[in-house]
Image (cartoon, helix red, strand yellow):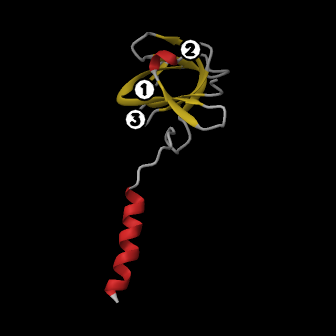
Amino acid sequence: MTRFLALPLALLTLAGCGGSDAVAPPERPPEYTGVLEESDGEGRLLVRAEGDACGIWTAPEDDARVYGSTEDGAYEEIGWDDLRTGSSVDLWIPGPIAESCPMQGAAEAVAVAGRR
């Protein structure tokens, strides 16, 4: 009986090991969404949501990623230097957010909405 289960289990294990070419930001909702107002050239971004007087300064975590949307609605990884002021962005900030004005937090991912 175990011999009959071994082959299907081995195939499932191999299928799970296959790499996926899908590129995407974290699956949870972003912690902050707004317009990119300023970038200091080192990955720090000032993003401000509509109606938010303060916004948030983010600094990238060591392995932070930046994503842009493609024509077909998927994502592609882009560079920090591809970010442009005036773009609408989503921020994923997994750790604490300092409640200053502007707020501060480390970004694990940034996605540019509607990038073409």
For residue 105, the mark is 1
* Picture layout, residue 19 above or below residue 58: below
Spatial distance from mark 2 to mark 3, Cα to Cα? 25 Å
- Amino acid carrying label 3: it is Gly
The residue wearing badge 3 is 95
Q: SS of the residue at dot 1?
A: strand
Residue 67 in the image, given as x and y percentages of width and height: 52, 30
x, y percent for residue 22: 50, 43
Q: Residue at 50% x, 39% y: name it.
A: 23
Quadrant of the rendering where the N terminus is positioned: bottom left
Residue 64, picture quadrant = top left
Tag 1: residue type? Gly
Q: In which quarter of the image is the C terminus?
A: top right
Q: Which x, y percent locates residue 44?
A: 43, 17
Instruction: Assign a secondary structure to mark 2.
Output: loop
Dot 2 or dot 3: first in sequence order is 2
Please give the residue where the numbered disc 2 appears in the rendered image: 84
- Tag in front: 2 or 3: 2
- Mark 2 is surrounded, within 10 Å at the Cα level, by few (under 14), some (14 to 19) or many (20 or more) other residues, namely some
